[in-house]
Amino acid sequence: MKKTKLLIGIRWIARIWGGIILLVALIALLQGIAGDRKFFTDFGSIALYIGLIPGLSIAYKWELIGGTIATLGIILSGFLHPLVVPPGIL
């Protein structure tokens, strides 16, 4: 399949956006670990980070697999705790 410039541009935009989200998620994860908040007592938060961080990391090499893992992590965390779901997903 021939890759057009538009497709390559969209992939790089998605990689950059995914990198920004991954950086913010890692900072929030480290802040939750270092802080004294009870962040990891909520199963929705745990499911979000278990699905989101590895999914976005894998998505740099394999877009479909990583995107699926990240999306399933967000959906699972939404079922476990509706307030964890980002507003963009609604």
Image (cartoon, rainbow, N blue to C red):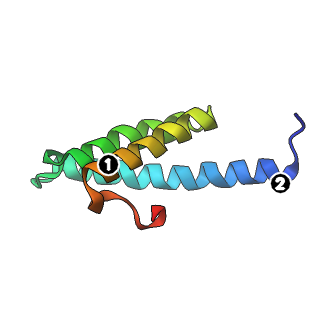
Res 46 quadrant in image: top left
Between residues 2 and 82, which one lies in front from this camera angle? 82
Report the quarter where the N terminus lies: top right
**SS under mark 1:** helix
Between residues 77 and 28, which one lies in front from this camera angle? 77
Between residues 27 and 58, which one lies in front from this camera angle? 58
Point 73% across, 53% down: residue: 10
Between residues 59 and 73, which one lies in front from this camera angle? 73
Point 13% across, 46% down: residue: 41
Residue 6's disc is 2
Q: Position of residue 16 (x, y in %)?
A: 60, 53
Residue identifier under label 1 = 77
Label 2 crowd bin: few (<14), some (14–19), many (20+), radius 10 Å: few
Tell me which numbered mark, 2 or 1, is placed earlier along the sequence.
2
Residue 27's disc is none
Task: Tally the numbered discs.
Answer: 2
**Residue 56 falls left or right of residue 35:** right
Res 67 quadrant in image: top right
Label 1 crowd bin: few (<14), some (14–19), many (20+), radius 10 Å: many
Report the quarter where the C terminus lies: bottom left
Say above or below: 57 vs 6: above
